Image: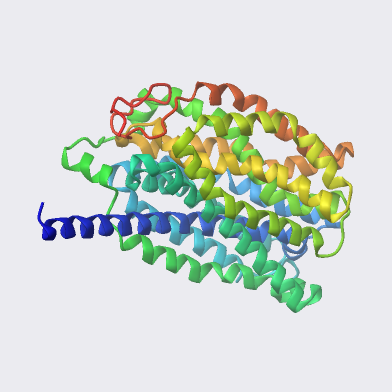
């Protein structure tokens, strides 16, 4: 082979790598924006409750905020049913460009809304409408973003590259929590309650424009373009999914229960649990949560790379077993009230969650064939999310308040692990295998390793 041909090959490889990296960044940006929104809500539920609800107590303010979060999840399956089939019919890129603008725009709009004191019950109605739009658009986001990365990634690096999607999740949440914390410290509680709460929501606008720019600069995925060129796309993806992939969707729903509950308990609910349930005061609980999340960001991509070497299932087994036996000790450590035991307890839950987060972006796309991958993923994922994730902070808060048992979150996590154990056991190992030729979630892809 001539030197010029070798150089041309290297240049082509570098160009392909740059394209894959841009695809990963564009996909992760949507997750970042979605979880930025949750970080903002999760780190000032009492403030937002006081602004938008006429509540008599701080607990009722928190419940009002979590109820708005939970109700918005009703819209997610509808978004999955709309955007999922579109993603399989017109392309992943076009749909993802739409969802990122809708998500960021709805979060931005909340920063412009009047308070309850100014307009009465119109205020929470406006927030609820914005959250419904956010939920509807998010219904097409995660499935599409994970599919986008998986279909761009080389087979043997799909775990590592897919884990960057959840790096975006943690980045968004930490950014939202960080903006709230900085504003609270810099402005003070009084100014934060008066007008400062608007700032974190308004930041979502520029973030959305950056994400939109990144997504519109890319071609659609190689697998989608290949299917389109060979006329292998479905004219009615939804009908095909409901006829041929319903078992896989049920499988996905059961598997995702543990991830969703762990995700929303750890990220959205934990600040409220530490301050309102355990009665921890000052900035220390918030800072410990942020440090733990930052540590998750450090380890999540190495864990994703590990799944490419040893497989996805060992990490899934470890997470499931861990959530069966470790939540009670972890929450008891948190209840000790000192910084060291608090950090250890949070770190235990965070590590188990990291095993799940680093694995699912590569596992879930491999459950369905290319022609209906987006649709199947979006429907199953969002049905599970609506049923179990969005309701988790509200239900756990309500159960703790009703029973007085501070270990309710631990029991909740353990129950989720019991439900997910069988679906995790039934998942095939797909590390290193091609996404071409996938037929269902219970069969190995037909393509050979490579």
Would you say residue 13 is visible in this rendering?
Answer: yes
**Measuring 43% from the left and 63% from the top, which residue is drawn there?**
211
Q: How many marks?
A: 0
98 left or right of 122 in image: left
Q: Measured from the top left, where is residue 219 in percent x and y?
A: 27, 56
- In the depicted structure, whether residue 40 falls above or below residue 237: below
**Residue at the image position 16 percent from the left and 42 percent from the top:** 229
Tell me if 399 is positioned left or right of 23 in this view: right
Image quadrant assignment for residue 127:
bottom right
- Pinpoint residue 205: horizontal percent, then vertical percent: 51, 69
Residue 191 horizontal side relative to residue 10, left or right: right
In the image, residue 181 lies at what x, y percent?
Answer: 71, 68
Instruction: Please identify the quarter of the rendering in which residue 185 is found.
Output: bottom right
Residue plotted at (21% across, 35% down): 232
Question: Vertically, is 64 above or below 262?
Answer: below
Q: Which is more toward the observer, 96 or 12? A: 12
Q: Nearer the viewer, residue 412 or 350?
A: 350
x then y, percent, for residue 132: 56, 52
In the image, 184: left or right of 220?
right
**Residue for point 22% across, 60% down:** 11
Q: Is residue 78 visible?
A: no
């Amino acid at each position: 082979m001539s030197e010029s041909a070798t150089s041309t090959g290297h240049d082509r490889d570098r160009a392909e790598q740059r394209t894959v990296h841009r695809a990963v960044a564009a996909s992760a940006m949507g997750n970042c924006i979605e979880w930025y929104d949750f970080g903002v809500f999760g780190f000032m539920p009492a403030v937002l409750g006081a602004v938008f609800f006429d509540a008599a107590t701080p607990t009722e303010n928190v419940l009002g905020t979590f109820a708005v979060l939970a109700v918005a999840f009703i819209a997610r399956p509808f978004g999955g049913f709309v955007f999922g089939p579109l993603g399989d019919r017109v392309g992943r890129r076009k749909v993802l460009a739409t969802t990122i603008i809708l998500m960021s725009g709805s979060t931005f709009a909340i920063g412009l809304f009047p308070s309850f004191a100014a307009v009465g019950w119109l205020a929470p109605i406006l927030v609820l409408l914005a959250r419904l739009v956010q939920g509807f658009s998010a219904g097409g986001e995660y499935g599409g973003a994970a599919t986008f990365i998986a279909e761009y990634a080389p087979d043997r690096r799909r775990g590592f590259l897919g884990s960057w999607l959840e790096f975006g999740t943690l980045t968004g949440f930490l950014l939202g929590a960080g903006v709230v914390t900085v504003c609270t410290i810099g402005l003070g509680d009084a100014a934060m309650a008066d007008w400062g709460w608007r700032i974190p929501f308004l930041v979502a606008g520029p973030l959305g424009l950056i994400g939109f720019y990144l997504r519109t600069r890319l071609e659609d995925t190689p697998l989608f373009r290949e299917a389109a060129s060979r006329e292998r796309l479905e004219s009615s993806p939804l009908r095909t999914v409901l006829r041929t992939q319903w078992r896989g969707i049920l499988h996905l729903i059961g598997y995702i229960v543990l991830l969703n509950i762990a995700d929303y308990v750890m990220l959205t609910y934990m600040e409220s649990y530490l301050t309102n349930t355990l009665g921890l005061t000052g900035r220390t609980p918030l800072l410990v949560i942020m440090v733990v999340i930052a540590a998750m960001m450090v380890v999540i991509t190495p864990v994703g790379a590990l799944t490419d070497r040893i497989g996805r299932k060992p990490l899934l087994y470890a997470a499931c077993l861990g959530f069966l036996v470790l939540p009670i000790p972890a929450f008891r450590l948190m209840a000790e009230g000192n910084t060291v035991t608090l950090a250890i307890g949070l770190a235990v839950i965070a590590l188990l969650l990291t095993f799940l987060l680093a694995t699912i972006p590569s596992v879930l796309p491999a459950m369905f064939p290319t022609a209906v991958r987006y649709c199947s993923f979006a429907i199953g994922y969002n049905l599970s999310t609506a049923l179990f994730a969005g309701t988790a902070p509200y239900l756990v808060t309500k159960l703790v308040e009703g029973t007085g048992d501070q270990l309710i979150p631990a029991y909740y996590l353990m129950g989720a692990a019991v439900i997910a154990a069988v679906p995790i056991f039934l998942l095939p190992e797909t590390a290193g295998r091609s996404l071409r030729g996938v037929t269902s979630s219970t069969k190995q892809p037909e393509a050979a390793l490579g």
